[in-house]
Image (cartoon, grey):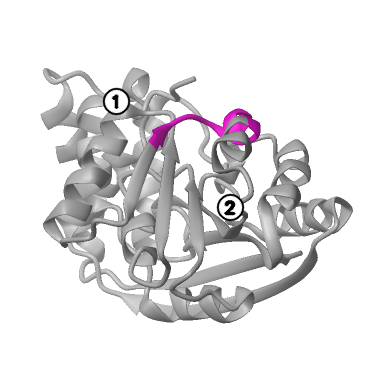
Amino acid sequence: MALGFAGEVAGFYHRYRRGYPPAVFDAVVEAFGLTGDDVAVDLGCGTGQVTVPLSARVRAVVGVDPEPDMIAHGRRAAAERGQANLSWMIGTDADVPALRALLGDASVGVVTIGQALHWMRHDELFRELIALARPGGGVAVLTNGTPLWLQDSDWSRALRESMEQWLGTRLANACGTDEESRRRYGESLVAAGFQVDLHRVDYVDTPDLESIVGGVLSALPVDRLPPLAERPDFTDRLRRALEPHAPFTEHVPVTVLTGRR
């Protein structure tokens, strides 16, 4: 079932969601001993921020997402980079058993989940994935920093206050990037039979005003995206809140939670 990240939201996602540093893919390759003979699955692939660069490290990648518009952007991104070893599937975590049947004996080296696990039933999913992974393969759960509006900085606090006033609700959901979520995911991986480890890559980003506002728009489901007539007021509100705090610095902790079979 689609989650509401279609149409122009998928476009915002493709344009403004940052990718992952090369060191993150190095960590995934090392954790599972990935080679050019391996097949990978990127579950909840979005517009391909993990799918496309991962395809350069393995024989083939299957990108899975419930939103056709997300997949369309990912497919174009792969074509622009000349990556022909990707295939795309409309589906969710509930479709993993069907994926197992499709792949047959071709067990995968890794299933990556890039900041999408909070949409999934992770306990059931991990039990399904241990049968999909080859010996030594497994699952990599990736996060790419804290949501823009939940960081410990003046500009982030100003952004959060402005968004909460507009949306009329408190914003506290860390979308699976918090320590408590990682603990729960790790315990669930262990219960499913995986050996768990945690890798971390930190970097500093200096987003501009446009990329912060675009990042906010990319995170709002279609039903919460301000209508076109109200969009200028919404974006102007965010810009006015942010401008006194420029320039913007963001300390980005990327985590790679691995479960190895």
SS type, badge 2 = loop
Whole-percent x, y for residue 153 in the image: 42, 66
Q: Would you say residue 85 is visible in this rendering?
A: yes
Extreme-front residue of the structure: 105
Point out the frontmost of discs 1 and 2: 2
Verify CB contact (< 8 Å) between mark 1 and mark 2. no
- Other residues around mark 1 within 10 Å, as few (<14) / some (14–19) / many (≥20): some
Q: In the image, 60: left or right of 80?
A: right
Query: What residue do we see at 18% from left, 63% from top?
Result: 208
Which residue lies at the image location 19% right of the left edge and 52% below the top edge? 77
Reply yes or no: does residue 246 show up in magenta: no
Which residue is located at x 60 percent, y 30 percent?
98
* Residue 201 picture location, percent across and down: 50, 79
The spot of residue 66 in percent (x, y) is: 43, 29
**Three-letter amino acid code at disc 2?**
Ala
Please give the residue where the numbered disc 2 appears in the rendered image.
106
In this view of the protein, which residue sits in the foreground, 181 or 124? 124
Task: Please state the extent of the stretch shown in magenta in the rendering.
Answer: 89-97
Residue 225 has which mark? 1
Image mark for residue 123 = none
Q: Position of residue 33 (x, y in %)?
A: 59, 78
**Does residue 121 sit above or below 59 in this rendering?**
above
- Give yes or no for residue 95 being in the magenta stretch: yes
What is the CA distance from the residue labelled 1 to the residue labelled 2?
Answer: 41 Å
| Amino acid type, label 1 | Leu
User: Which of marks 2 and 1 precedes in the sequence?
Assistant: 2
